Image (spheres, helix red, strand yellow):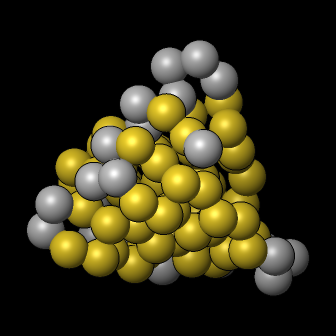
Amino acid sequence: MALNVALVSPTQKVWSGEATFVSARTTEGDLGVLPGHSPLFGVLVDGAVSIKGTDGSVKEFNVRGGFLSVSNDRVSILTESVD
């Protein structure tokens, strides 16, 4: 079982694909998402977003604010900008 993940900014689709784990920092604290996670909506703070692909590779992105949404094994990460 995998997560369908999309990380986008206003100017580009930064990354999309299947992943086994996503971590990010929200205003409520650090958050980890695995397949089967309950639905949620979080406000991102500036910091790292880590995505572990189904092939085992780990992608790290430095995001600047935004939102994270989880529903039915779909993770949408919308950020103001990515470094």
Q: Is residue 35 left or right of residue 24?
A: right
Q: Residue furthest left?
A: 28
* Among the 4 quarters of the image, the one containing residue 29: bottom left
* Among the 4 quarters of the image, the one containing residue 7: top right
* Quadrant that contains the N terminus: bottom right
Q: Residue furthest front?
A: 83
Give the percent coordinates (x, y) of residue 48. 48, 64
Q: Residue, x 73% and y 74% (percent of image)? A: 58
Q: Residue, x 41% and y 30% (percent of image)? A: 80
Give the percent coordinates (x, y) of residue 81. 49, 33
Q: Is residue 15 left or right of residue 28?
A: right
* Among the 4 quarters of the image, the one containing residue 6: top right
Give the percent coordinates (x, y) of residue 60. 64, 65
Q: Between residue 21 and residue 58, name the one nearer to us.
A: 58
Q: Is residue 28 left or right of residue 51?
A: left
* Quadrant that contains the C terminus: top right
